[in-house]
Amino acid sequence: MSKITGYLRFQDGLSDWVGKATSWLTLGIIGVLLYEVFARYIFNAPTVWGHELATMFFGALSILAGSYTLRHQQHVRSDVIYRLLPFRVQAFCDVIVFALGILVLAIFFKLAVEFAYRSWLIGEYSNSSIWRPALWPIKSTIPIAVGFLILQCVAEFVRAVVRLFGMRYDDPRDDMSDADY
């Protein structure tokens, strides 16, 4: 196994693990919303925290799933023209897209770290409800998620460069064991 294949296998595995771990938040969302429905309509005692907690879980789920989604090439893209291009031109386009993506995400990562840090520093709480939950935990998921997305973007960039230069490698995406996601 080449170093490139080993790196891609590690990074893809990390993105898979993050995606699968994050998917458990779905059960949290369902649990909170079911509790809220029963409390509101069966016991006539709605919660002050249900909607906001479900929203926080959904926000974390949505942003943390980014690296998993990129790893499985499931982000929305227009590939009508892309698929008509020769293999190496596709790779060249991917090199440009992922290089720009890494640059933009690096800027976003810096801003997200500052955003989360300020929230931690002031002990920020929500003013959306009388529950007033702490916001720094959910705001901290933003730089974490962007960091995972940058790591997967780097792996996609490496794939594109390798394809552009016609180097041979075993892409872990071609493994049948990855088909069970």
Image (spheres, rainbow, N blue to C red):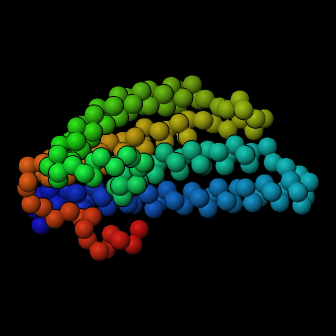
Q: Nearer the viewer, residue 107 or 141?
A: 107
Query: Looking at the picture, does residue 36 appear above or below residue 153?
Result: below
Residue at the spot 86% in from the left edge and 53% down from the top edge: 40
- Image quarter of residue 99: top left
* Residue 129 percent coordinates (x, y): 76, 35
- Image quarter of residue 24: bottom right
Horizontal arrangement in the rendering, residue 8 relative to residue 168 (left or right): right
Horizontal arrangement in the rendering, residue 49 relative to residue 145 (left or right): right
Residue at the spot 12% in from the left edge and 66% down from the top edge: 1
Residue at the spot 67% in from the left edge and 38% down from the top edge: 133
* Residue 25 percent coordinates (x, y): 57, 56
* Residue 33 percent coordinates (x, y): 73, 55
Horizontal arrangement in the rendering, residue 80 relative to residue 122 (left or right): left
Query: Looking at the picture, does residue 146 appear above or below residue 43?
Result: above
Q: Nearer the viewer, residue 92 or 119?
A: 92
Q: Is residue 60 visible?
A: yes
